[in-house]
Image (cartoon, rainbow, N blue to C red):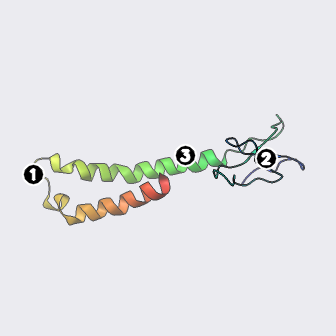
């Protein structure tokens, strides 16, 4: 949850400074989160984006590690037959889909 800012705070896009709004939101041009135009030392720092991206990073890493291991397992001598079969490909697909579409 974003920390409330003082009334009358003006928000702007870091990439498009001509975009200004009286409330937080997303830039209509690029979609980035609007930032307060003036930041005071008394206002607490909002780190919700950092927490969200950190969570996505770790979940993506957890989903990607088994995909990597399955994809490289054909190099292991005497690996089980299912590793080179359709079951392995489906497992890789199921794990890689959220890693690419959500975490990425």
Mark number displayed over residue 11:
2
* Camera-side mark, 2 or 3: 2
Q: Which is nearer the N-term, disc 2 or disc 3?
A: 2
Q: Residue at x 31, y 53 (%)?
A: 67
Q: State the separation of the CA atoms marked 2 and 3.
A: 24 Å
Q: Which residue is mark 3?
A: 54
Image position of 55 (left or right of 98): right
Residue at 74%, 52% in the rendered image: 2
Local secondary structure at mark 3: helix
**Category of crowding for the residue at label 1, using alpha-carbon neighbours closer than 10 angstroms: few (below 14), some (14–19), many (at least 20):** few
**Residue 102 placement (x, y as % from top left):** 49, 57
Closer to the observer: label 1 or label 3? 3
For marks 2 and 1, give the CA distance: 60 Å
Q: Residue furthest left?
A: 78
Dot 2: what SS? strand
Tell me how far mark 1 sits from mark 3, CA to CA.
38 Å
On residue 78, the disc is: 1
Residue in the foreground of this view, choosing between 22 and 67: 22
User: In the picture provided, is 4 more to the left or to the right than 49?
Assistant: right
Q: Position of residue 88 (x, y in %)?
A: 24, 61
State which tag comes first along the sequence, 2 or 1. 2
Query: As displayed, is residue 39 above or below residue 56?
Result: above
Q: How many numbered discs, if any?
A: 3
Give the vertical position of 42 relative to 90 (above or below). Answer: above
Circles 1 and 3 in contact, beta carbons < 8 Å: no
- For marks 2 and 1, give the one nearer the viewer: 2
How far from the left and from the top, in percent, is residue 96?
37, 57
- Within-10-Å neighbours for mark 3: few <14, some 14–19, many 20+: few
């Amino acid at each position: 949850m974003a920390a409330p800012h003082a009334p009358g705070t003006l928000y702007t896009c870091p990439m498009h400074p001509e975009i200004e709004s009286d409330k937080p939101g997303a830039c209509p041009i690029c979609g980035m989160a609007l930032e307060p135009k003036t930041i005071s030392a008394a206002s607490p720092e909002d780190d919700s984006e950092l927490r969200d991206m950190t969570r996505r990073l770790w979940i993506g890493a957890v989903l990607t590690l088994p995909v990597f291991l399955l994809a490289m397992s054909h190099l292991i001598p005497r690996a089980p037959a299912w590793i080179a079969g359709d079951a392995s490909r489906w497992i890789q697909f199921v794990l890689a889909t959220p890693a690419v579409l959500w975490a990425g």
